Amino acid sequence: MGQRLLQPTQFNQKGFFEDIEINRINEDILETVVPRVPEVIRSKLFPGRPKVGQRWLAYLPPNVCPRLTDTTAGQIQELLDNQPFCFKDPRFSYTLSAWRPYLKEAAFICVFRHPLTTVNSILAMAATDPHLAGLHVTPDRALRVWMAMYSRILTQHALTGDWLFIHHQQVLEKTGLESLATFTGADVDCSFPDKSLMTTQVVPDIPAKALPIYQELCDRAGCTAKC
């Protein structure tokens, strides 16, 4: 999963299982469509625009495609030479197409949550996480990011390759872990998930504009949209 994983925080007390180098490469790829802006300009004119390290909260329209540079292409190839690998990063929702030529027989796993659970989590992090300092995040903006990421997965990325969709509630109930074990052929520690660590309360009413995306995710995962 990489050599330097992000350290646990109050938001993920057991860890993120994301590698710093993977995050950095995906940040570099996203910089081709979300370029840096001088901070004095960004803070005053574009406070909702993510800066370096914050691009996992970028909003990209479906026709905007991040691209590789010669440097990132070489770094990706070097990382993929170490097999087997399992890379996790929310930025893959946007950058996966740039990695595709190098992935060969990789399988893909999409874990998702109720959209408003995700929105509440993003807002909580934006309010307290120093890595998100200076980024203005509204509930509507967070929901737009959720919709943009999962819509791109469903309409572009998932058209190719072997995919497994898992609702995070299925993981807590072990059915998702059993599916994960079958899909990957790997041993899965079913004792790892801990329901007591859930801190964000699910809001039952799903915004109408997000419902079709969420419904399709749930259908692919084999669960109800009431999760």
Image (cartoon, helix red, strand yellow):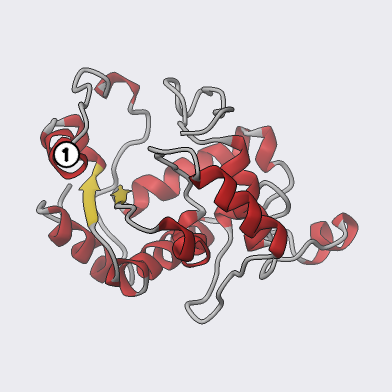
- 140 is higher (above) or lower (below) than 10: below
- The answer, for residue 31, to whether it is visible in the render is yes
Write down the quadrant of residue 195 in the picture: top left
Q: Residue at the location (65% across, 46% down)?
A: 24
Residue designated by label 1: 176
Is 181 left or right of 210, judged from the image as shown?
A: left
Is 93 left or right of 219, judged from the image as shown?
A: right
- 175 is higher (above) or lower (below) than 117: above
Q: Amino acid at mark 1?
A: Gly
| Residue 39 coordinates in the image, percent (x, y) | 86, 55
Few, some or many C-alpha atoms within 10 Å of disc 1 (few <14, some 14-19, many ≥20)? many
- The answer, for residue 208, to whether it is visible in the render is no
Question: Which is more toward the observer, 192 or 25?
Answer: 25
- 82 is higher (above) or lower (below) than 147: above
Q: Residue at the location (42% across, 21% down)?
A: 14
Identify the secondary structure beneath mark 1.
helix
| Residue 155 coordinates in the image, percent (x, y) | 33, 74
| Residue 154 coordinates in the image, percent (x, y) | 30, 68
Q: Residue at the location (20% across, 26% down)?
A: 187
Image mark count: 1
Q: Residue at the location (22% across, 52% down)?
A: 164
Q: Residue furthest front?
A: 81
Write down the quadrant of residue 4 in the picture: top right
Question: Which is more toward the observer, 22 or 43?
Answer: 22
Question: Which is more toward the observer, 67 or 146?
Answer: 67
